[in-house]
Every structure is written in C-alpha cells, then in structure tokens.
Amino acid sequence: MNWRSEHIWIELITGSRKISNFCWACILFLGSLGFLLVGTSSYFGRNLISLFPSQQIVFFPQGIVMCFYGIAGLFISSYLWCTISWSVGSGYDKFDRKEGIVCIFRWGFPGRNRRIFFRFRIRDIRSIRIEVKEGLFPRRVLYMEIGGRGDIPLTRTDENLTPREIEQKAAESAYFLRVPIEVF
C-alpha cells in the first residue's frame, strides 16, 4: 500500500508477514511434528500416528534420527513463527519533498536495535540505482545511492520484480526525488 501526494510519498513495506512465510511455517511445523511423533512412537512401541505402524520403524537408529529431525524442524518452525509475529523487515519509506527529508524505517529482531531508522536529506541522494543480474536466478534490486552513506536498498532482494516493474518503480522514485537513474 502506498500513499502519495504532491510533496509526500509513503511506501509501506510488508516484511516477513507474507503468505509464503505462513505456508512454510505451517508445513514445517506439521512435518516436523509428524517426524517427532513417529520417532517417539517407535520408542514406546505404540502407534501415536495411525498411518505408520511402529513395528516397522526400529528406534535405534531410525527412530532417533526421526526424533532429531522433528526437534530440528520444530526449532526452525518456531523461528519462522517468531519472525512473522515480530513482523521483521516491515516498515515504511517516507519521502518528503516539502521538508527535504527521506525517512526509512524497518522493524528488526527484538533487542537493542529493534527499530532501524535512517533519516537524511534529499539533496544528499546522488541517484536511484538499478542492479540487474540475469541468469538462472535473476536478481533485480533498486538502490538509493547516498553520498557518504553508501547504497540503501529500496526493494527486497527476494522480491521478483519484472524488468518493467523495476524500471517503473525506479522512474517514479527518480522523478519524485528529482535525481538521475543509474543501471548496473
């Protein structure tokens, strides 16, 4: 969702609360729970899951390995659920031509640096840069080049934008900020 007026442009960033992350967290949780239940049912010799008879899986070594994979999967699943609940990576980009200020805000992991906030003047922006790497895994990222601070990405690296979309976004940003576009 974006909000735009003549002098202010606010672009909201979704971060880790994407549908794909929800799907992967659910799949990983259910799969690892299944592995853990099959491993523990082989230990107890009782069917905790009716799909697999516990007599077919010997506890040592198959049951131990399945328990290990189940526990490891639960840890990874809990990590995904935590990043989703903390909304890591979400935030906003605010461009204010009237004040001459750009604000970039993102939520990080809990701790001292949970809030990531950059603020700088529009006149410090040198250009909007498009980085394109084609091949088996194409990568198209939009950066804002700032004098003395380096490059700040405006799009996520995992965001699969088409060449037309990245060009349009770069053109809109460059036009609004009145800076040139560079392509690498």
Image: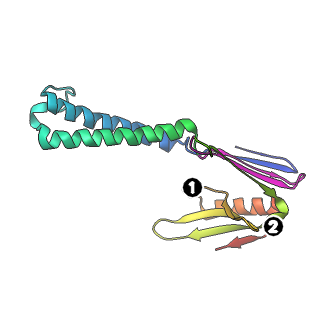
- Please tell me which residue lies in front, 116 or 39: 116
Looking at the rendered structure, the secondary structure element under dot 2 is: loop
Left or right: residue 46 versus residue 74 is left
Residue at 89% over, 52% down: 99
Q: CA distance from mark 1 to mark 2?
A: 24 Å
The residue wearing badge 1 is 159
Q: Residue at x 11, y 38 (%)?
A: 58
Can residue 17 be found in the magenta stretch? Answer: no
Q: Can residue 57 be seen at all in this image of the molecule?
A: no
Residue 100 sits inside the magenta stretch: yes
Q: Residue 33 occupies which quadrant of the picture?
A: top left
Residue 109 visible in the displayed image: yes
Callout 1 amino acid: Glu
The stretch of residues the image draws in magenta is 89-110
Which quarter of the picture shows residue 173? Answer: bottom right
Q: Report x, y in % for residue 32.
A: 31, 38
How many C-alpha atoms fall within 10 Å of the one at disc 1: few (<14), some, or many (≥20)? few
The residue carrying mark 2 is: 179
Three-letter residue code for mark 2: Val
